[in-house]
Every structure is written in C-alpha cells, then in structure tokens.
C-alpha cells in the first residue's frame, strides 16, 4: 500500500470512527439497532463531501473555504474563497459535474443515494435569485395574456427553482422536451 493510500485509509477510518462515536443511542435503549437520526445522517453526508472536496482542492492547488449545512432534507456544502470560477464553468457545467462526483463519493462511503447540493462561490444562490425573477416575470406574462409561456432549456436544478416559484404563485408548470433541451412551460390558471 502506498503512502498516499495509507493516509487516505487512515482519514476514512478516522471519519468513520468519529461518526460512530458521535451517534448516540436514544436514552433508555441499549444502543442495539439504533439508527442515526436523519439530521445526523445528512451531517455525515456533508462531512464525507467536505473531506472529498477538500482533497480535490488540495490536488488542484486551489484555496477555498468549505461550509457544510443541512437545508431541509439534504446536505449542503458551499465552497467560498478566491476566484473559483474554474469550478463553476460555463453555465455551471463544471459545478454540476463536481456535484455528481461528490454525490458518488458519498454513495461510496454510505451505500445510500445522496441529494447533496453543492455551491461554489455563491453561484447557485445568485442563479436562484435570477431564476425566481425570471419566473415572476413569466408568471405575470401568463396571467396577463392567458397563454402558456415556454422558457429556455435549463438544468434540473434550474427547472426545480422555476417550478417552485410557479407553484408558490398558484399556477402550474411542467417540464417538456428531452435533455439537453428540456425546459419549463408555465401554464395559465
């Protein structure tokens, strides 16, 4: 086993041991069969993802600060710091790929599919704000004209943001088309 493989194994073992030590059984139980709470499992996912991403930043010789959180029913990891635009790529394509690789790293460790959300340099937060504004403008157009409006092709994340904004406004929407031209259609009431 090489020195790097030994170090990686030690880090993985230490993370696993720390997770097991931090998970406590419900009071009054003997601990057998006790499963970590959903929040604890999501925090563990975030820790695995943060370790994976930290290693990736080291390999790429990039400086970045990682912040892990649990938002709703998913773990969330944000990478901030200096110019990290190469981790976002054109229209977020590198970010999407990096998120999928990180989800695979979590799956490899937990054996469970992850819905982890990754953001780099606030890109997704800014994108969410822009998409909500676009949805609001399109909703007003649909309400005024009474006709459906088709938006430009979007990623699954982008479509979800628009669908949520449309639902909050009391209208309905659907996704139409096949990747990579899948897009949202906002329907009149």
Image (spheres, rainbow, N blue to C red):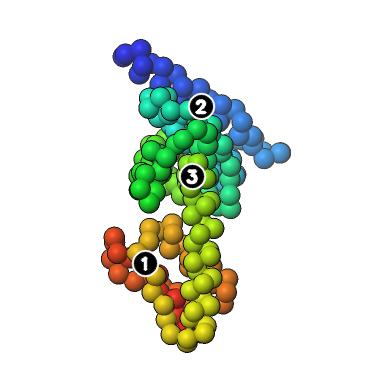
Expressed as whole percent of the image width and height from the top left, the position of residue 121 reads 50, 41
Query: Between marks 3 and 2, how big is the CA–CA gap?
Result: 23 Å
Crowd around label 3: few <14 · some 14–19 · many ≥20 (10 Å):
many
Query: Between marks 3 and 1, how big is the CA–CA gap?
Result: 22 Å
For the residue labelled by badge 3, is the local secondary structure a helix, a strand or a loop? strand
Reading the image, the residue beneath label 3 is 119
Q: Quadrant of the N terminus?
A: top left
Q: Nearer the viewer, residue 129 or 98?
A: 129
For the residue labelled by badge 1, is the local secondary structure a helix, a strand or a loop? strand
Left or right position of 122 against 148: right
Left or right position of 26 against 52: right
Residue drawn where x is 45% and y is 80% of the image: 187
Left or right position of 154 against 133: left
Report the residue that reaches farthest toward the bottom. 146
- Of the image marks 2 and 1, the number of the one nearer the N terminus: 2
Q: Where 189 sits versus 173, above or below?
A: below
For the residue labelled by badge 2, is the local secondary structure a helix, a strand or a loop? helix
Crowd around label 2: few <14 · some 14–19 · many ≥20 (10 Å):
some
Expressed as whole percent of the image width and height from the top left, the position of residue 20 reads 56, 30
Reading the image, the residue beneath label 1 is 152
The circle drawn on residue 15 is: 2
Q: Nearer the viewer, residue 177 or 131?
A: 131
Residue drawn where x is 41% and y is 47% of the image: 113
Expressed as whole percent of the image width and height from the top left, the position of residue 45 reads 50, 39
Question: Which one is closest to the eye, mark 2 or mark 1?
Answer: 1
- Of the image marks 3 and 1, the number of the one nearer the N terminus: 3
Q: Where 152 sits versus 31, above or below?
A: below
Labels 3 and 1 touching (C-beta < 8 A): no
Q: Where 130 sits versus 48, above or below?
A: below
């Amino acid at each position: 086993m090489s020195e790097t493989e030994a170090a990686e194994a030690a880090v993985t073992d230490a993370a696993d041991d720390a997770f097991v030590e931090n998970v406590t059984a419900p009071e009054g139980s003997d601990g057998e069969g006790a499963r970590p709470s959903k929040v604890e499992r999501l925090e563990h996912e975030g820790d695995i993802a943060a370790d994976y991403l930290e290693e990736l930043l080291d390999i790429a010789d990039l400086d970045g600060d990682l912040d892990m959180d649990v938002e709703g029913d998913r773990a969330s990891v944000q990478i901030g710091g200096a110019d990290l635009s190469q981790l976002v790529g054109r229209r977020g394509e590198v970010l999407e790929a990096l998120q999928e690789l990180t989800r695979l790293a979590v799956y490899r460790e937990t054996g469970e599919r992850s819905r982890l959300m990754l953001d780099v340099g606030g890109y997704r937060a800014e994108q969410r704000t822009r998409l909500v504004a676009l949805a609001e403008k399109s909703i007003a157009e649909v309400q005024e004209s009474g006709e459906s409006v088709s938006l430009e092709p979007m990623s699954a994340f982008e479509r979800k943001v628009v669908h949520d904004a449309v639902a909050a406004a009391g209208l309905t929407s659907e996704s139409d088309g096949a990747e990579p031209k899948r897009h949202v259609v906002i329907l009149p009431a």
